[in-house]
Amino acid sequence: MLTNRSKLVVKKEMTFWEKIYLPAIFSGIGITIKHLFKKSATVRYPEQTREVSEIWRGQHVLKRDEKGAERCTACGLCAVACPAEAITMVAAERKKGEEKLYREEKYASTYEINMLRCIFCGLCEEACPKEAIFLTDRLVSTDYGRDGFIYGKDKLVESVDNRIDVSKRQTPAVLQFKKIKLFSHNK
Amino acid sequence: MVKVTIDGIEIEVAEGTTILNAARQIGGDVVPPAMCYYTSLKDSGGKCRVCLVKVTHTSTKDPRPMPKLVASCRTNVMDGMVIQNITSPEVLEARKGVVEFLLINHPLDCPICDQAGECDLQNLAYEHGVAKTRYEEERRTFEKIDIGDKIKLHMTRCILCYRCTFVADQLTDNRVHGILGRGDTSEISTYIQKAVDNDFSGNMIDVCPVGALTDNTFRFKSRVWFTKPLDAHRNCDKCCGKVVLFTKGDEVLRVSARKDKYAEVTEYICNECRYDHKRLSDWVIEGPRHIDRNSVISQNHYEKIDLLKLKQEIERQIDFEKGKQLPEPNQSLTA
């Protein structure tokens, strides 16, 4: 009785109707039956998918430029911007004859995103100075182990023939916003 | 001793001190930036023009203002001198112009450059520069040159501060590199790309304010903000042996000399310490290096904060800000 907040528990004697439990059971069945005629809340994925926003933040893509060279130059800004510390990379120097593969003189020889750590906030996309990384409307698929969720360049870089459209994420308004945001410190 | 006033702050300094050093004795925001001046290198300074200040009172004897802005690293103080740095809009505008000039031929390849994150020009442009370039002409470009097997010269990034030639001249015995050509075409070069191989040549990397001279053994190894800087020392018969190790795990990626808050090397180190001891066991680790919390290198590094010191610093900042106008609101947030 130190706080004066304790309550005495009273065990009330149940009435006859409460004792036979039948009204409670029937009302419970009633709720179940009511839900049979309601619209189902689940979708039958993957045959059916839910409608998502055009700029849904899903699985990342590493873009290539018009000529098919990788845009990423392993500058590390996405990794330093990442609040979940999900991105790691190793840089390498482009050799002679690899100009068609990599756009800049430095490129990412390995680039890994741990999809279990990733929170899909999109800060990597915002930080990227080379327009190389984008989040897409694809979902990250499930797996049985943890290793499968560490996505390397094989899963992240788009293939030359099968480009991934990110034009929806690059509207003039978005580009303008990025521009103002980039240089707002100079005012 | 002479008495000078910089941005309304009075200080007594020894005769023959430059304005820049007088401002550094005050410290804080009134210190003009410097890209070419280097305390430990004789005759350095006067080239980059970012340290321009306005002298409104030349001295007590001669109260006239100086006719134009002066380079603070090359101008000595006089008794009763009144100097305006950040309180003068003229200075700020001129400095903005100088930054634009420095960036005219700069390739702006920071995402590739190894210096990014600890680059003086990057910091300078961030603080004073204009974001848009008005330069439409072709920028000068040079081929990359290997100066010896340990130093990479990207002449394209050079701002011609001459610091490296002073190092070659004053720290090493025979200078084999210098500046060729004049004006727009001047470039740093060794005669017939002769290798620089004397014990202190590696210090050129540390004095370079931009990414023009970089460590070839560290080239593209890691971004500097993913490394963990440690203070360390070893017994070296050639130099002081006091260095900073940039480590990643148990690996030493780069060894460099220790720099003070003005990014100037306090004690130069020899090439043996810089290049040949890339194992943690070679060094006596003193502890994590203090990194300014405004630096990107401090990202994800945690160190014990001296709360009392931090409080004093914040109070000093508040006092300083009281005399200043508040900055304009961030338009991207309000618009």
Image (cartoon, rainbow, N blue to C red):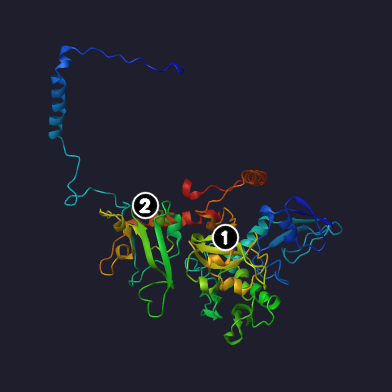
**SS assignment at label 2:** loop
Q: Quadrant of the N terminus of chain B?
A: bottom right
Viewed as shown, does residue A30 lie left or right of B170?
Answer: left
Question: Residue pushed farthest right?
Answer: B61
> Does residue A120 lie above or below A61 as drawn?
above
| Residue ID at (60%, 46%) | B326
- Mark yes or no: residue B91 visible: yes
Q: Position of residue B3 (x, y in %)?
A: 82, 54
Label 1 neighbour load within 10 Å: few <14, some 14-19, many 20+: some
* Quarter of the image where one finds residue B280: bottom right
CA distance separating discs 2 and 1: 28 Å
Viewed as shown, does residue B38 lie left or right of A4?
Answer: right
- The residue at which mark 1 appears reads as B230
* Quarter of the image where one finds residue A22: top left
Closer to us: B46 or A170 = B46
Dots 2 and 1: beta carbons under 8 Å?
no
Q: Chain of mark 1?
A: B
Q: Which amino acid type is marked by label 2?
A: Arg
- Mark yes or no: residue B157 visible: no
Label 2 neighbour load within 10 Å: few <14, some 14-19, many 20+: some
Q: Chain of mark 2?
A: A
Callouts 2 and 1 on one subunit: no
Q: Position of residue A133 (x, y in %)?
A: 37, 61
> Does residue A25 lie above or below A42 as drawn?
above
Closer to us: B302 or A154 = B302
- The residue at which mark 2 appears reads as A117
Q: Position of residue A36 (x, y in %)?
A: 13, 34
Disc number lying in front (2 or 1)? 1
Q: Position of residue B212 (x, y in %)?
A: 56, 73
**SS assignment at label 1:** strand
Q: Which amino acid type is marked by label 1?
A: Leu
